[in-house]
């Protein structure tokens, strides 16, 4: 009597394990690929005390102070204030997490949209700025000099009515470096962490 054929489901399939492994790796890699580029240590921050992380402004007699009212939609905000209690520079940070409160958003897409709107509005001196960040632009909007920085998951806006572009660029570079290095060693604080002093 000839042997009975084995049903196909019971046969050993030597390549089936590799196929399942490939599908598993694809499912693990897909989210990492889609979220790639948001590797800044603060990209996942909800709220931070930005003043505690910023370097001092290089001019004597200035202090860092949180704004009296929080900046809506931001991860953190801080003002550089002079001896007369006048705001010298405003710094606002928005992370991928705080930007994505109503659905997935990327800081790079917001940067691109902001750039297009700034260019269309006819501001003065729109130009790219090189630095240790992914991309940045500077421009003058009325009386305010502005520097917008996108750094792989965070968006920084620095603006000043009393300081020029080179001063803002230098401080922007110091801020970007401080946020990258400090975030590695510090934990992200709770939403109520910012202490409004100004």
Image (cartoon, helix red, strand yellow):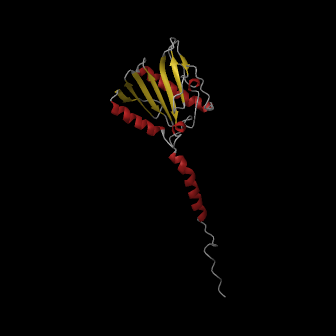
Image quadrant for the C terminus? top right
Q: Where is residue 134 in the image (x, y as percent from the top left)?
A: 46, 35
Image quadrant for the N terminus? bottom right
Residue located at (51% from left, 47% from top): 33
Indicate the quadrant where residue 111 lies: top left
Left or right, 145 with respect to 5, comes to left
Asked whether 139 or 101 is in front, the reply is: 101
Residue located at (54% from left, 38% from top): 97
Q: Position of residue 171 (x, y in %)?
A: 48, 22
Is residue 155 positioned above or below 167 on the image? below
Is residue 6 positioned above or below 92 on the image? below
Indicate the quadrant where residue 113 lies: top left
Number of numbered discs visible in the structure rendering:
0
> What residue occupies the far right of the structure in this picture?
1
Residue located at (52% from left, 38% from top): 96
Residue located at (56% from left, 26% from top): 50
Asked whether 88 or 2 is in front, the reply is: 88
Is residue 4 positioned above or below 53 on the image? below
Q: Where is residue 20 in the image (x, y as percent from the top left)?
A: 59, 60
């Amino acid at each position: 009597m000839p042997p009975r054929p084995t049903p196909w489901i019971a046969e050993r399939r030597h390549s089936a394990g590799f196929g399942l492994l490939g599908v598993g790796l694809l499912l693990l890699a897909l989210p990492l690929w889609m979220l790639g580029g948001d590797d800044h240590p603060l990209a996942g921050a909800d709220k931070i005390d930005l003043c505690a992380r910023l370097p001092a402004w290089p001019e004597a007699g200035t202090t860092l102070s949180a704004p009296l009212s929080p900046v809506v939609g931001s991860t953190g905000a801080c003002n550089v204030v002079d001896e007369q209690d006048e705001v010298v520079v405003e710094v606002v940070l928005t992370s991928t997490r705080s930007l994505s409160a109503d659905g997935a958003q990327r800081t790079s897409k917001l940067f691109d949209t902001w750039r297009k709107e700034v260019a269309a509005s006819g501001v003065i001196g729109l130009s790219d700025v090189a630095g240790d960040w992914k991309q940045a632009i500077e421009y003058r909007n009325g009386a305010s000099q502005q520097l917008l920085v996108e750094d792989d998951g965070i968006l920084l806006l620095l603006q000043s009515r009393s300081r020029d572009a080179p001063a803002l660029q230098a401080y922007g570079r110091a801020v970007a470096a401080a946020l990258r290095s400090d975030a590695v060693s510090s934990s992200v604080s709770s939403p109520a962490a910012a202490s409004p002093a100004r």
